[in-house]
Amino acid sequence: MNFSVVLEALNQASAFELFRLRVAINRKLDDPQWTHAIRSRLHVGQEIDYFSSTDNTVRRARIDELRRKQAAVTDLGDGRRWLVDFFTINVDGMDVQVREQVAKGLGRNEVMVGETLGFTDRDGHERSGSVQRLNDKTVTLQVGHQQWRVAYQLLHRVVDSIPGMAVDLPQQISLPLPTES
């Protein structure tokens, strides 16, 4: 399923239509047929990927116990134990990346906790840091020893950086002209 196309269609919906869709989706997820289909593919000790809605990313975990609608898992990244609903487990290994078409910056669904992103501060310094928290309108970035709250539309992907580093962006670049010899 192309999540970007679905999100584009959802952007045209009213709040009531979104709520009605949420109710229908929740009912579908609670259908015992889905629960049984997923549970039958899981076993204790199995390593799985589950989607964390808090971090907006896929996490790796090991199943410790199977319950009626949930699995007790140990997150392999931080060692913490969680109860995750079966429907959050990516049993088919599907691509869950959302690529929104935004005019500028990044879309809220494109950003994940732990990811390194960059932005330009008010003084023109290019900064990069690790995403600590996702808020409604901003992202909390750890940049060196400081935390910054940055709007999604000001963020950009970072190819290679030293976290916390600030770089002055020149306002005008002057290059020496070649001289004739």
Image (cartoon, helix red, strand yellow):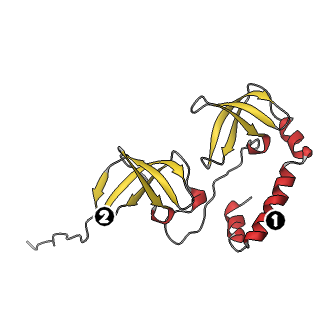
* Number of other residues with Cα within 10 Å of mark 2, as a class: few under 14, some 14 to 19, many 20 or more: some
Which residue is outermost to the left?
181
For badge 2, the amino acid type reads Gly
For badge 1, the amino acid type reads Arg
Examine the rendering and report whether any part of residue 156 can be seen: no
Residue at figure coordinates x 73%, y 70% from the top left: 15
Q: Earlier in the sequence, mark 1 or mark 2?
A: 1
Residue 124 to residue 161: above or below: below
Write down the residue under mark 2: 124
Query: In the image, which is nearer the foreground, mark 1 or mark 2?
Result: 1
In the picture, the quarter occupied by the N terminus is: bottom right
Examine the rendering and report whether any part of residue 18 can be seen: yes
Write down the residue under mark 1: 20
Residue at figure coordinates x 71%, y 61% from the top left: 2
Residue 39 to residue 131: above or below: above
* Number of other residues with Cα within 10 Å of mark 1, as a class: few under 14, some 14 to 19, many 20 or more: few
Q: Which mark is residue 139?
A: none
Q: How many marks?
A: 2
Classify residue 86 by image quadrant: top right
Would you say 158 lies left or right of 8 here?
left
Classify residue 99 by image quadrant: bottom right
Frontmost residue, 38 versus 31? 31
Residue at figure coordinates x 35%, y 47% from the top left: 164
x, y percent for residue 50? 69, 41
x, y percent for residue 122? 33, 64
Secondary structure beneath disc 2? loop
Secondary structure beneath disc 1? helix
Classify residue 126 by image quadrant: bottom left
Residue at figure coordinates x 86%, y 42% from the top left: 35
x, y percent for residue 134? 55, 53
- Mark 1 → mark 2, Cα distance in angstroms: 44 Å
